[in-house]
Image (spheres, rainbow, N blue to C red):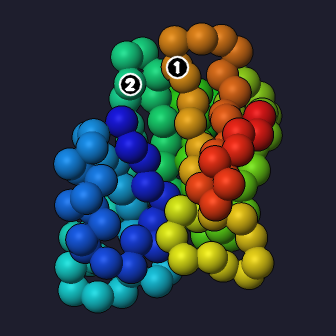
Amino acid sequence: MIVHAGDLGDPGILEALRAVAPVVAVRGNVDTSAWALALPETAVAEVGSTLIYVLHDLHQLDLDPAAAGFRIVVSGHSHKASSAEKSGVLYVNPGSAGPRRFRLPVTVARIDLSRGPLKPEFVNLDTGTLHP
């Protein structure tokens, strides 16, 4: 499954991602065109027994993910790869796989849900290097 936390910029990106795997995507602040209005502001992905809450800007989180049963929260907005665990919930920002922003590396995150503890692996798409 591919989870996209917004700022797609072009509907063709969704089509290309869907050719690879099922996609859960939300609208980001740069997604203002008519096609993007069909994207939700938040979404829930369920992979096996793992619930993932998806939103663009973590500062707009308006629920307690642990109390709601979510194990992972995926957000974007800053385009800076990061992860942290709080109250048993893994918070992940995969960074940005699109055009470079703010001199940040071009990254995605992978999480293997079959192994515990859950830990994202960040992939630098410029170099192919992995970072835990």
Q: Quadrant of residue 70?
A: top right
User: Residue 73: x, y in percent?
Assistant: 58, 42
**Disc 1 packing (10 Å; few <14; some 14–19; many ≥20):** some
Q: Residue at x 49, y 58 (%)?
A: 5
Identify whether 14 is placed above or below 113: below
Residue 63 seen anywhere in this rendered image of the structure: no
Nearer to the camera, 2 or 54: 2
Q: Which of marks 1 and 2 is in front?
A: 1
Q: Give the amino acid at mark 2.
A: Val
Mark 1 lies on a secondary structure that is loop
Q: In this view, does 42 lie to the left or right of 13?
A: right
Q: Which amino acid does label 1 sit on?
A: Leu
Q: Are marks 1 and 2 in contact (CB under 8 Å)?
A: yes
Residue 113, numbered circle: 1
Compared with residue 59, is residue 117 higher up or lower down, i.e. above or below? Answer: above
Residue bearing the label numbered 2: 47
The residue drawn where x is 66% and y is 34% is 120
